[in-house]
Amino acid sequence: MNETVQLKLNKIVKDLEQSIYESEMAIDHPEKGYPYAAGYSRAALKMVLDDVQLLKSYLENASN
């Protein structure tokens, strides 16, 4: 697999794992709670979407 694609996929996995962890830890935290968890998850989803769109564009350009 292309090194660029592999690096991006590894970043996506790391971002998603961190988001899941942060969300699970924040729910019962007295100062963070649901708003923090939701905000963190939303930010992670946006990062993953950007990365997937970049990969899609990269793969489309590589096949031309």
Image (cartoon, grey):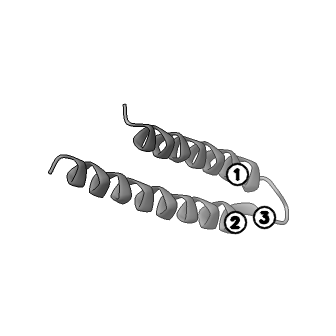
Residue that sits furthest to the right in the current view? 30
Could you tell me which secondary element the residue under label 3 belongs to? loop
Which residue is at a point 29% across and 53% down the rendered structure image? 56
Q: Residues within 10 Å of mark 1 (few under 14, many from 20)?
A: some
Residue 22 is labelled as 1
The image quadrant that residue 53 belongs to is: bottom left
Residue at position x 70%, y 51% in the image = 22
x, y (%) of residue 62? 24, 48
Q: Which mark is residue 36?
A: 2
Alpha carbons under labels 1 and 2: distance apart:
9 Å
Q: Do tag 3 and tag 2 residues touch (Cβ < 8 Å)?
A: yes
How far is disc 3 from disc 1 in space, using C-alphas? 10 Å
Residue at (28%, 57%) from the top-left corner?
Answer: 57
Q: Amino acid at mark 2?
A: Tyr
Q: Quadrant of residue 35?
A: bottom right
Q: Quadrant of the image for the N terminus?
A: top left
Q: Position of residue 51 (x, y in %)?
A: 43, 56
The answer to whether residue 28 is left or right of residue 21 is right
Q: Are marks 1 and 2 in contact (CB under 8 Å)?
A: yes
Q: Residue lying farthest left?
A: 64
Among the two numbered marks 1 and 2 on one chain, the one whose residue lies closer to the N terminus: 1
Q: Amino acid at mark 1?
A: Glu
Q: Is residue 47 left or right of residue 19?
A: left
Where disc 2 sits, the SS reads helix
Pointer 3 local density, CA inside 10 Å: few below 14, some 14–19, many at least 20: few
Observer-nearest of 10 and 64: 64
Q: Estimate the x, y position of residue 5 in percent, counting from the top left.
A: 40, 42
As drawn, the label of residue 32 is 3
